[in-house]
């Protein structure tokens, strides 16, 4: 197994599903993901595009990191497949007609050393939540309003 996939050294892994009306991916997201990966912030493990056409037909296209996919395949454990064809088809089928989604699995490489230290100290993740962007915007606007806009 490559050092990047050492279970004691891998950073937290997230799966995000980003929905779009229509199925025309314009490509603005790819450069942003590549920039994050080039900077060492994340490592893209799996990337897929799913869609449901206006008639309700669902389909997907998966783009994998070949090295990571091969390492997980070596484990010979169905549970090790982070995003499989059944998952992708389920996501595609759950979409409204004439919509699409990008599904991305990434390792938060920026947090790998912290995650390793926490595991080494016997720490366990008890809760993890992401604050919705809208809530952050509202909080920032409230702080600005209370400080006179400064």
Image: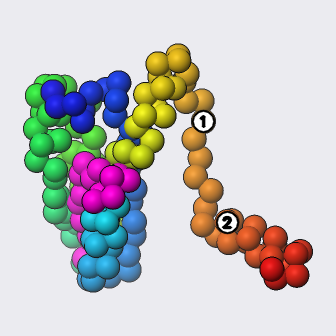
Closest to the observer, 30 or 89: 30
Q: Residue at x 34, y 34 (%)?
A: 10
Tell me if mark 1 has few (under 14), some (14-19) or many (20+) residues whose alpha carbon lies within 10 angstroms of its own: few
Q: Residue at x 80, y 80 (%)?
A: 150
The residue that mark 1 highlights is 127
Above/below status of 88 relative to 135: above
Is label 2 in a helix, a strand or a loop? Answer: helix
Q: Position of residue 52 (x, y in %)?
A: 27, 71
Residue 105 showing in the rendered view = no
Closest to the observer, 59 or 61: 61
Residue 37 showing in the rendered view = yes
Q: Magenta span covers which residues? A: 37-54
Q: Position of residue 41 (x, y in %)?
A: 38, 53
Q: Residue at x 34, y 29 (%)?
A: 9
Which quarter of the picture shows residue 99?
bottom left
Please report contact status of discs 1 and 2: CB closer than 8 Å, yes or no. no
Q: Is residue 50 magenta?
A: yes
- Mark 1 or 2: in front is 2
Above/below status of 111 relative to 77: below
Tell me if mark 2 has few (under 14), some (14-19) or many (20+) residues whose alpha carbon lies within 10 angstroms of its own: few
Closest to the observer, 66 or 49: 66
Is label 1 in a helix, a strand or a loop? Answer: loop
The residue that mark 2 highlights is 136
């Amino acid at each position: 197994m490559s050092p990047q996939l050492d279970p004691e050294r891998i950073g937290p892994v997230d799966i995000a599903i980003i929905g779009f009306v229509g199925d025309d991916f314009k490509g603005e997201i790819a450069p942003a993901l590549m920039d994050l990966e080039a900077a060492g912030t994340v490592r893209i493990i799996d990337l897929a595009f799913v869609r449901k056409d206006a008639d309700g037909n669902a389909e997907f296209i998966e783009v994998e990191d070949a090295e990571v996919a091969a390492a997980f395949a070596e484990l010979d454990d169905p549970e090790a497949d982070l995003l499989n064809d059944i998952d992708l088809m389920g996501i595609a089928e759950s979409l409204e007609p004439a919509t699409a989604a990008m599904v991305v699995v990434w390792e938060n490489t920026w947090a790998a050393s912290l995650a390793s230290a926490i595991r080494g100290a016997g720490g366990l993740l008890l809760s993890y939540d992401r604050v919705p962007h809208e809530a952050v915007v509202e909080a920032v606007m409230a702080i600005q309003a209370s400080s006179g806009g400064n």
